[in-house]
Image (tube, rainbow, N blue to C red):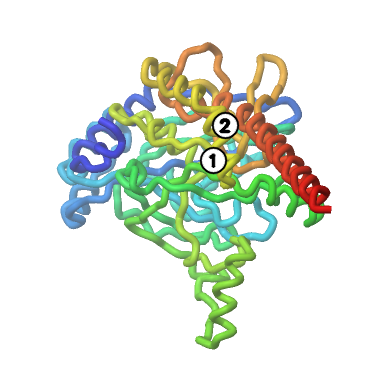
Amino acid sequence: MNDGELAKQPAPILVQQLQSLLSGLHDNPYPAVPNPPACNKRASVALIIRIRPTFPDEATIDSSSTTQGLSVHNSLSSFFDQSWVQRGDPEILFIKRAAREGDRWTSHVALPGGKHEEPDESDKATSIRETAEEIGLDLTTEHSIFIGNLPERVVTTSWGTLPLMVLCPFVFLLTRYDVPPLRLQPSEVNSVHWVSMRALLAPSLRTYEHADVADRLARRRGGFLRAILRSMLGQMLFAAVRLIPSETIYCNSVPDFIPPQTTLSLSTSIENVIVPLISRDKASSSMYDRPLLLWGLTHGIMADFLDLLPTSNTFKLWTWPTFSPWDLRVMVWLMTYRLHKRKVQELDSERQESPTIIEEGLDTLGVQKNRWQPHGVHMDGLGLTGSQHASNRVTSSGAIGHLLEGHYELMRRAVLVTLILRLGIGVGVIALVLRRMRRRR
């Protein structure tokens, strides 16, 4: 059963598979990833799941009981045995980060979480504290079950040269759908969105995020260099999922909660058409104007989580990063076709234990036993996965990392070959024009 078929299945089937996923995740915790040399920062995020009932009144009565004092397995069994849960729709909570100038993750869709601080006893404690601070949700109550962790990721800075932090995802299940009213922190969060897992699995909602790589590569350089890079590379296209929330809560104290008043004058109409074409400043536009796109770091976490579903083939819906110019896109496809085909075949034939996952925008990094050694193409932080393999075995939960292994090295070669071809064609055209001009004389 592929993900498109799974998304169309009746809710009970997905609920049953979710129970199996959570039980397996609890039984098979992933090891903690130590910080690379010269990097002491860690961060944690919370992947929060709830079941939206078909009949809320029925759920309110049944969900009054708690699972306090029970083991995780008994808690899961007690929760999933309820009739309203079996007929419900599993959902995951996402936040849309506040719009802030200069923030590389401004307005991104993400999971609640943040950086580890001294009072935190563990990475798990960080995810619990940050969730409470950002959205006001307490994950320590009797109506929350801690399931386990997902593979930890190493986030790096520009070109993968320096490790920035270790990112640790933790999974929680809410046993009540009617959680207390959320309190959003306006400096951190613009909005909160509950999204059905069926929507995350639907092929029809797969799309691309367009990222301006030139601005990131030449962030500290002049505008002229950025213009040259933009003309050569265009934009990067990243796999993304368009989110359709079943429930949304906005923070009403953020500056753009009420869109600015506009008039119907001709000048304003022209401005509304021209400004979006010449500016991609996401931090300055209204939060209602931008679609909810799941991509980058959070997309990698979710892809690994959904790939743990017993009948999921999330990796088959994956699209590899590429460039917007047609010649670059064709060259990338030609040079990566055999690699992609082999990677998909390996995932089809063998699904084993997950490796440590290492992330950075366009980076694919490797950590050897005693030293930090990046490899592949590294273009500042847009949040995709790479992986470290302790062996040659392919893993299910590390599927996306496995697919990207080696991809960026070939992308770098494709860029070089394309630029050389462009230069050669340009020189040839100029030579031909000059030759004809001489003949006319």
Residue 106 location, x and y as percent? 60, 55
> Residue 111: in sight, yes or no?
no
Residue 332, quarter of the rendered image: top right
> Residue 173: in sight, yes or no?
yes
Q: Identify the element where label 2 is drawn.
A: strand
Residue 187 vs residue 319: left or right?
A: right
Q: Are marks 1 and 2 in contact (CB under 8 Å)?
A: yes
Q: Residue at x 30, y 51 (%)?
A: 177
Q: Which residue is mark 2?
A: 153
For label 2, count other residues whose C-alpha is less than 10 Å away and answer few (under 14), some (14-19) or many (20+): many
Q: Residue at x 66, y 14 (%)?
A: 369
Q: Nearer the viewer, mark 1 or mark 2?
A: 1
Q: CA distance from mark 1 to mark 2?
A: 9 Å
Q: Residue at x 39, y 60 (%)?
A: 248
Please name whichever residue, 145 or 403, is drawn nearer the observer in this view of the structure.
403
- In primary-sequence order, the first of circles 1 and 2 is 2
Residue 297 - label: 1
Residue 232 vs residue 327: left or right?
A: right
